[in-house]
Image (tube, rainbow, N blue to C red):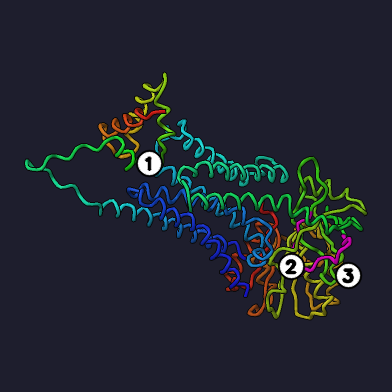
Amino acid sequence: MTQMRSVAWFAVYALAVLAPLLVACVVRGPSWSDFRTGFGAASGWLAFALFALEFGLVTHVRAAAAAFGSDALLLFHRAMGFAALGFCALHVLALSPEPRSWFASSSLQRSGLFAVLAALALIVTSVWRRELRWSYELWLVAHRALAVALVVFLAWHLAPFAGEGSLLALVATYSALALGALLVQRFVRPAVLAQRAWEVVENRDEGARTRTLVLRAVGHDGLRFAPGQFVWLATERTGWVAQEHPISIASSPELDGGRTLELAIKALGDWSSATVPALQPGARVRVDGPFGAFTPDNCAAARLVLVAGGIGVTPMRSILLAMRDRGDRRPVTLFFAARCRATAMFADELERLQDELALEVVFVFEEPEPGERCETGLLSAELLRRRLPADLRFAHVFVCGPAPMMELFERLAQELGLPPAQVHTERFDMV
Amino acid sequence: MRVTTVRRTAAGFGLALLACAVLVGGLAQTRRRSAPAEAPSTEATPPPTAPSGAELWAAHCAACHEVEELAPQLRGERGAARALEWIEFLEDHGEGDTREDRAVLAFLAGQKD
């Protein structure tokens, strides 16, 4: 069912990408007099559609996020950004190969140049955000501003070709939908969510530079979510930037009927190091969600294998607590990798859960204490082969952790012959 | 969904789009080739007149440019200098010969405000 939904969503997306080109072929095609003009024009229309639809890929649409997973959508968003830039380059090389012409004074050349510069700035600042030492908040503001500028420059560039009629309507519609998606996400949705407030009940220090925020619904019946999903948490505005971050839910969906949420947040940046620890009981926050496809509720698994690195254990805690609350006795193996026990949040609680579930916890510490019962070193293919259950035919594997760990497991899953449908991943360091 | 799945999907989709662009270009080229060829002139048939600047503009330039956008730049003090720059530029832009390029420029320069 999930696969059918994914295919349907992808088909809609593909049609939306091709629609402007198809209409342009009908309206403008007769004036394309040779291969270079036709190819260059087609590349331009594809670049426009890809850029405009980038907004849709990252809008918080729960149905799409449930079909693919939010991290998959983000990865695809990045890939399509590169594709759009590539088609932009082909368009320029085909129609205006002489660099002198790029700086000509016509509005066509100017708008095209500005659009390309905006697109390049978008991609460069996203790929090299950390090297540029930009905070996530600064990057987010710049990314949105550049995206708006890009749409405006593209519409300006295309207006002379769109003429009147269907093509102009298409350009206007795509541009309006792109900007509208941003406005809805940035202003409308927060205003709606403000009516469903959450209050901080407790701000607990878990050690390992991690804090657990316990939130209670104010005046509404809380959140219905599946274990393993995440929410966008918005705290108060600092300056003119709204602080909104994706955080996995750490508690069971059965806790207080969804009226109480526990969110575990590790200090990784300005917001998580300064704003989160300062949240006092009584503070109001905004919760948007749930999102994500990273949940065993969507699959029929006879056995679960959970592989977590660092803060990646948070959704695993939600999954295990849900199993406990539901009396789910399916065998589960949890691999939890951390530097040492002191940095392994919830370690004691996870060990206790072994008495309540058919759970085996395998700690993997780089620097274990003497006498510690754990595997030593990094999570490796050899360790996983040795400790994974022998029969994985009906097992589903959930992996959440730093990128190197995720990539290691994805390679190992291929070597073990695990079907892709049985491996579920959630990346949390996308930008 | 695995990273490899996403990357393969994106790559496949990108290649499919590239194929669409190539197809469109190919169709445009096919349309050009199948346009009726000019009959060779003989002593009994007067030679065809050279296409005018307006005809050349409509056939080769109008797909991407507007007259109102370029014509004003050939007026005024810098108009003559700009025309010389554009003649040089047109040697690499488009497929006309020098005579045709000059005809297009003359057409643009003759546009009224």
Residue A416 shows up from this direction: no
Which residues, given as a range, are shown in magenta? A215-233
Left/right of residue A88 with respect to residue A118 in the rendered view: left
**Along the line of sight, the residue nearer the viewer: A186 or B7:** A186
Between label 1 and label 2, give the one nearer the viewer: 1
Taking A35 as reference, is A411 left or right? right
How far apart in space, not on screen, are marks 2 and 3 (Cα)? 28 Å
> What is the tally of numbered marks visible in this picture?
3
Amino acid type, mark 2: Phe
Q: Give the residue at mark 2.
A: A335
Label 1 neighbourhood size at 10 Å, few (<14), some (14-19), many (20+)?
some
Q: Is residue A46 visible?
A: yes
* Quarter-of-image position of residue A296: bottom right
Say which element carries label 1. loop
Location of mark 3 (residue) = A256
The numbered mark at residue B62 is: 1
